[in-house]
Amino acid sequence: MGRIAAAYNWFDERTAIRSLIRKGLYEAVPVRGAWFYTLGSATLVLILLQLITGIFLTLLYVPSVTEAWASLHYLSQHDAFGSIVRGIHLWSAYILLFVIGLHMVRTFFSGSYKRPRELNWVTGVGLFVLVLAMAITGAFLPWDQAAYWTAVVVTNIAVYTPFIGSFLRALWRGADTVGPTTLSRTFGIHVWLIPAILFPLIGAHLALLRKHGEFGSYVNYRGAYRSREGVDVPPAPKQRPIEPPYPAVPTDELWAAPLETEDFYPHQTFKDGVVSAALVILVFILAVAIGAPLEAIADPATTSYTPVPEWFFLPLDELLLLVPQQLIPLVLVLPTGGVLLLLALPFIDRDPERNPFERPAVMVPGAFAVLFVVILTLLGSGRLFNL
Amino acid sequence: MARRDPRRLSRRQFALLGTQVAAAVVTVLLGIPIVGFLISPLFRREQAVWRQVGDIAGVPDRQPTKFEVAFPLGEWTNANVNLAVYVVKINADYRVFSNVCTHMQCPVRWEDGLRQFLCPCHGGLYDMTGNNVGGPPPKPLPQYVHRIDGTTLFIQNRFTESI
């Protein structure tokens, strides 16, 4: 036995690393639809990109109203590599919001949130909300004009909460107006508070994924689970004698398993790697070619600056414009209601039917909701950028 | 096994209760200062400061005129922050408006062509007397607490009505 093998055995005896790696890599995953499952791993890769570049940005950035802009301005003037790191942080955040949205739409479309994966979906909605919160709090930090007015408008939305509005606004701002405490608090929320919830939740999301397996799309399961009427019970699918989460024999009426499976490693990791690497290359190109902008330093006394929201904030901004003054709280009610509906989705739609074309009661409202957000975004961008 | 007196704590119940009490003590001892720390800014009285805006003898009638005034940024910093002030003279009456829109607090501007204050964010409009006359703003344009000594205008860093 070679020395390396002996050392590995020594280490394995003390940590059980071998079985841990086997468990992590040799999981059975569906063969068909596998390119769609790369969206989840791409989301994870982009979040890790955020973590890494974010950690390195704190090596320079100063979270203070008198220093924040100056520190990033210094970066842009004197540190080309630092500017790329900041560019990666910004562009991977933008692309992350796209990819996490696609991941969610895919899950919705294929009905993957159904029993027993309700909590995979619920933790996913939580992660989506936290990623949005990261994007919004991150937008405050450069303390340029764009950041300052984003901070003013976003924190001010809280004031329209019934009864406790001004309390909530003051709690976030740390004062009646946006000032030094606002930036300190938002920085703390961005780098500690949200990640402290986000990363354990990612762990839970992945643990649940490992427990129940990738659900896959309808095409994976055509004829693989019993019809609800009990007629034409399909034959048990041909598959390798695999370990859970895909039992080889039907366990109950709702049982569903992929027709064909293969090992996670290296088959799925190859597809994951291709998609993630392509996205990272795209992020890198955007970071180098465009970079992260920095406008003039925050100036509350301006009467010439027109605040333009971040693109992911456009639907809400358009809603702010369209909602009449008596109904401003709608701007809070609609997104909150939307998130609550998303959380409730697997408990409302409990029919085991997974085929998207057999689920119009869910697919049609879902399509309208997406259309509503897209139209608001188009209206907002048309208004602000004269498209 | 000896009969247990049901009124007496068992060893197990005692341990369970002790664990719960310990957890409760830790939660309260950590929770009180942390929650207090979070909400303490809400009870901090902001110091009202008077600042000189300038000489307003030259402000034309019915022509909102912008001034900038430096106020302490407050809290732990020594820095100042510039605030924008629109002085509107109507006959002998002066009003001192902020540039803060009452809708989402964006910076409003006087538009000479419109003869109105315009908020560029969501199209809020205010007339020369500060009334919200169009768009989403729910309240009139905020006015600074002010006083005039001769022709010199002074303002405080607070509004006559909170927004």
Image: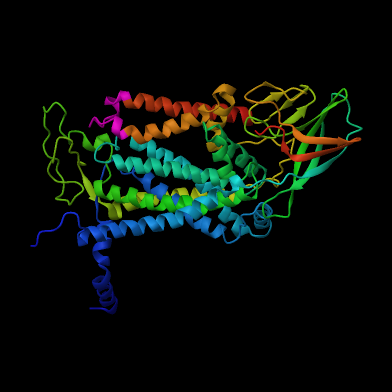
In the rendered image, residue A173, in percent from the top left (x then y), is placed at 59, 44
Q: Is residue A350 magenta?
A: yes
User: Where residue A342 appears, x then y in whole percent?
Assistant: 38, 34
Residue A285 at least partly seen:
no
Residue in the picture at 82% in, 37% down: B67
Q: Is residue A103 above or below residue A361?
A: below
| Quarter of the image that includes the C terminus of chain B | top right
> Would residue B14 be seen by someone viewing this image from the given angle?
yes
> Of residues B50 and A213, which is closer to you in this image?
B50
Picture quarter containing residue B134? Answer: top right
Asked whether, in this view, residue A134 is left or right of residue A153, the answer is left
Please tell me which residue is depicted at 72% across the width and 33% down the height of the picture: B160
Residue A39, given in percent of the width and then of the height, sits at 38, 44
Q: Residue at x 91, y 32 (%)?
A: B58
Q: Between residues B65 and A212, which one lies in front from this camera angle?
A: B65
Residue numbers of the magenta segment? A346-361
User: Between A246 and B120, which is closer to the camera in this rendering?
Assistant: B120
Compared to A100, does A19 lie above or below?
Answer: below
The coloring applied to the image is rainbow
Quadrant for the N terminus of chain B, please: bottom left
In the image, is residue A198 above or below residue A321? below
- Vertically, is A83 above or below A129? below
Quarter location, residue A327? top right
A387 displayed left or right of A33: right
Rendering coords of residue A38 (x, y %): 36, 46
> Does A9 appear in magenta?
no
Q: A157 or A311: nearer the eye?
A: A157
Q: How many marks?
A: 0
